[in-house]
């Protein structure tokens, strides 16, 4: 791929089932499965974003376990995937880290199961990212809980269209975030 691509999984600010703003817990499945998808599709770094200190201790311990020399030898594929996970407190840290790595602030791209105004098709965005003149890095942002709270929207530059199944916009499309990441990366970067 032409431009550096990043994935961020937000645990705050998130909506709960009642539409209230909450912070969700990091799940082990999201750490491992999304790390593998990001490695497969050439994503530079996968940011896990949570402001909660005890979650940093817990996730830090899990990541530490998979980053030992023993893990590198016994589970090289998992080691290679988890190597690219970065645990941060805020989305501000995501942007600063990307700017430090790549020299430019990223384009922030929201994903959502709901149809939001001015959403881009995958075909269109794939074409844009393939333009050899393009240099600006991209961060694809995914939610947890009942999705990303609208207080995050001022950060967003572009919105990707929802993924739909054969029933289309009227049908069921509430994917796990792990499936959504894999499908969206495949649509944008898969062969
Ligand atoms: C709302 S969370 C659901 C988290 C859930 N607790 C789980 O099991 O993964 C799912 C996130 O995946 C993405 N997502 C889910 N379904 C999607 C769809 N149909 N189209 C685009 N993105 C989708 C969005 O980023 C959304 O915030």
Image (spheres, rainbow, N blue to C red):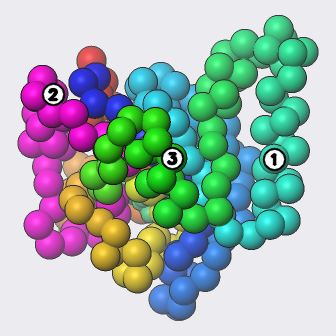
Q: CA distance from mark 1 to mark 2?
A: 35 Å
Question: Helix, strand, or loop for circle 1?
Answer: helix
Majority secondary structure of magenta residues:
loop
- Residue under pointer 3: 97
Compare residues 3 and 114 and report the one nearer the observer. Answer: 3
Q: Residue at x 32, y 56 (%)?
A: 108
Quarter of the picture holding the N terminus: top left
Q: Residue at x 87, y 15 (%)?
A: 69
**Residue 123 got which mark?**
none
Q: Left or right: 95 with respect to 154?
A: right
- The answer to whether residue 31 is magenta is no
Q: Position of residue 33 (x, y in %)?
A: 61, 37
**Residue 130 got which mark?**
2
Q: CA distance from mark 1 to mark 3?
A: 18 Å
Residue 31, image quadrant:
top right
Residue 84, image quadrant:
top right
Q: Which residues are magenta?
A: 110-139
> Tag 3 or tag 2, which sits nearer the N-term?
3
**Residue 60 got which mark?**
1
> Tag 2 or tag 1, which sits nearer the N-term?
1
Whether residues under marks 1 and 2 lie with C-beta atoms below 8 angstroms apart, the answer is no
The answer to whether residue 182 is seen in the rendering is no
Q: Is residue 86 above or below residue 169?
A: above
């Amino acid at each position: 791929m032409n431009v550096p691509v990043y994935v961020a999984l937000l645990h705050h600010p998130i909506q709960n089932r009642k539409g209230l703003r909450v912070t969700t817990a990091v799940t082990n499945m999201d750490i491992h499965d999304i790390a593998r998808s990001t490695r497969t599709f050439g994503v530079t770094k996968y940011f896990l974003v949570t402001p909660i200190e005890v979650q940093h201790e817990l996730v830090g311990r899990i990541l530490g376990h998979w980053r030992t020399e023993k893990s590198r030898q016994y589970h090289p594929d998992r080691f290679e995937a988890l190597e690219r996970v970065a645990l941060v407190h805020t989305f501000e840290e995501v942007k600063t880290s990307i700017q430090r790595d790549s020299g430019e602030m990223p384009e922030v791209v929201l994903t959502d199961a709901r149809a939001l105004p001015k959403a881009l098709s995958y075909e269109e965005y794939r074409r844009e990212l393939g333009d050899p003149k393009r240099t600006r890095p991209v961060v694809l942002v995914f939610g947890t809980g009942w999705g990303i709270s609208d207080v995050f929207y001022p950060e967003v530059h572009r919105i990707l269209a929802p993924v739909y199944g054969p029933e289309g916009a009227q049908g069921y499309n509430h994917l796990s975030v792990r499936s959504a990441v894999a499908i969206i990366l495949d649509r944008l970067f898969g062969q």
